[in-house]
Image (cartoon, rainbow, N blue to C red):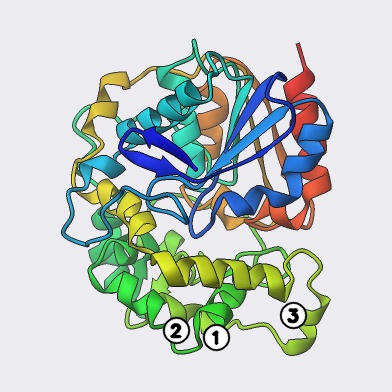
């Protein structure tokens, strides 16, 4: 536990010699620092000091307010950058070899790189492409809200998961999952993984209800269902669970235990900031590009790579100035560093060691 981190006491996992070049690994939702467990030791053995915090609102990090009506500014992107800078300062790290972000940790890593290239030397983004900082005046127009009415009006009425995660009932729905938290996590992780047969990924033509409705229901849900109900339809069989080589029952239990204790509201508040204009400070960087070396790693069966039409191409061409490559790991879904850790480590080491 590291106290005094921008108002937090931050739970941090570490591996490797503190005298080695440092890597900062930022998890997403619904994940934890624990989500990096399969890559931390190999990266440390390759000569790095590896640091993985439970981010604000997650796991065993404390000092944040878990009320739905709490002030959202502590969960804004700019403050999440402050969290990482404060952690590095507490650890005595002036310059980081790389920041690596997965899922919702990807935009945090991207904005760290954008705002403080003097601290973050390179950035690897995983599973969630970064299309660039928000345009002036755009922060109060959440894409999910813009499309909500059109999705609800479809012949099969739908809703975007960002919109759902921003609602007051979402945390209670998740905590009271009828199947129990363990089964919820098993189904949720399976549904978004390379194991689920429906993850046949392809680019979408545009941000329209008709195109977004092609996404699986974990992204564009049926209007009347909660997320636990949504993923329950895809609960793997006992045989499939026993055959799952990347997520054991004991590992699933860690997520159920940790979220059962902390709840989901901290992570859900990150989604809520997209609807409230809370991230408007980032508009000051409108049009700016990440100028340090950058790469992207995702699963070839991960709809997260394509869920925002055009974002992948924008990241490669407009949002970055020193692009080092896009890598889609065969067979992997959304949880690429957990599903295919050896392939993920190999790609990261190639990027980290390049001139």
Per the image, label 1 sits on a secondary structure element best described as loop
Contact (Cβ within 8 Å) of mark 2 with mark 3: no
- In space, the residues marked 2 and 1 are separated at their CA atoms by 7 Å
Contact (Cβ within 8 Å) of mark 1 with mark 3: no
| First along the sequence among labels 2 and 3 | 2
Q: Give the residue displayed 83% in from the left and 33% down from the top.
A: 45
- In space, the residues marked 2 and 3 are separated at their CA atoms by 19 Å
Per the image, label 2 sits on a secondary structure element best described as helix
Q: Is residue 59 visible?
A: yes
Looking at the rendered image, the quarter that the C terminus falls into is top right
Quarter where residue 224 is shown: bottom left
In the image, which is nearer the foreground, mark 2 or mark 3?
Answer: 3
Nearer-the-camera pick, 198 or 348: 348
Q: Which residue is mark 1?
A: 233
Q: Give the residue displayed 56% in from the left and 73% down from the top.
A: 185
Q: Which residue is mark 2?
A: 229
Where does residue 174 sit, x and y in percent of width and height?
40, 75
Contact (Cβ within 8 Å) of mark 2 with mark 1: yes
Q: How many marks?
A: 3
| First along the sequence among labels 1 and 3 | 1
Quarter where residue 332 is shown: bottom right
């Amino acid at each position: 536990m590291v106290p005094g981190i921008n108002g937090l006491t931050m739970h941090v996992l570490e591996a490797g010699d503190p005298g080695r070049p440092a890597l900062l690994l930022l998890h997403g939702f619904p994940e934890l620092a624990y989500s990096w467990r399969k890559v931390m030791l190999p990266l440390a053995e390759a000569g790095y000091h590896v640091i993985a915090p439970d981010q604000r609102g997650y796991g065993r990090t404390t000092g944040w307010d878990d009320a739905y009506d709490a002030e959202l500014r502590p969960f804004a992107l700019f403050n999440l950058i402050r969290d990482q800078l404060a952690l590095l300062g507490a650890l005595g790290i002036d310059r980081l070899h790389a920041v690596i972000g997965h899922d919702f940790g990807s935009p945090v890593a991207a904005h760290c790189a954008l705002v403080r290239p003097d601290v973050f030397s390179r950035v690897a983004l995983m599973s969630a492409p970064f299309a660039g900082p928000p345009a002036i005046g755009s922060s109060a127009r959440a894409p999910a809200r813009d499309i909500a009415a059109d999705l609800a009006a479809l012949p099969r009425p739908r809703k975007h998961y960002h919109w759902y995660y921003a609602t007051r009932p979402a945390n209670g729905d998740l905590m009271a999952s009828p199947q129990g938290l363990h089964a919820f996590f098993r189904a949720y992780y399976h549904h978004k993984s390379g194991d689920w047969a429906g993850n046949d990924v392809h680019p979408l033509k545009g941000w329209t209800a008709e195109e977004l409705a092609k996404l699986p229901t974990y992204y564009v849900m049926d209007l009347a269902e909660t997320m636990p109900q949504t993923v329950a339809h895809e609960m793997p069989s006992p045989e499939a669970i026993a055959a799952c080589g990347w997520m054991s029952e004991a590992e699933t239990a860690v997520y159920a235990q940790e979220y059962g204790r902390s709840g989901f509201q901290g992570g859900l508040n990150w989604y809520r900031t997209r609807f409230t204009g809370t991230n408007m400070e980032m508009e000051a960087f409108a049009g700016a590009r990440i100028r340090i070396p950058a790469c992207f790693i995702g699963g070839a069966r991960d709809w997260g790579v394509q869920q925002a039409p055009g974002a992948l191409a924008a990241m490669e061409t407009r949002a970055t100035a020193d692009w080092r490559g896009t890598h889609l790991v065969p067979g992997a879904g959304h949880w690429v560093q957990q599903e295919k850790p050896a392939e993920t480590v190999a790609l990261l080491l190639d990027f980290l060691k390049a001139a």
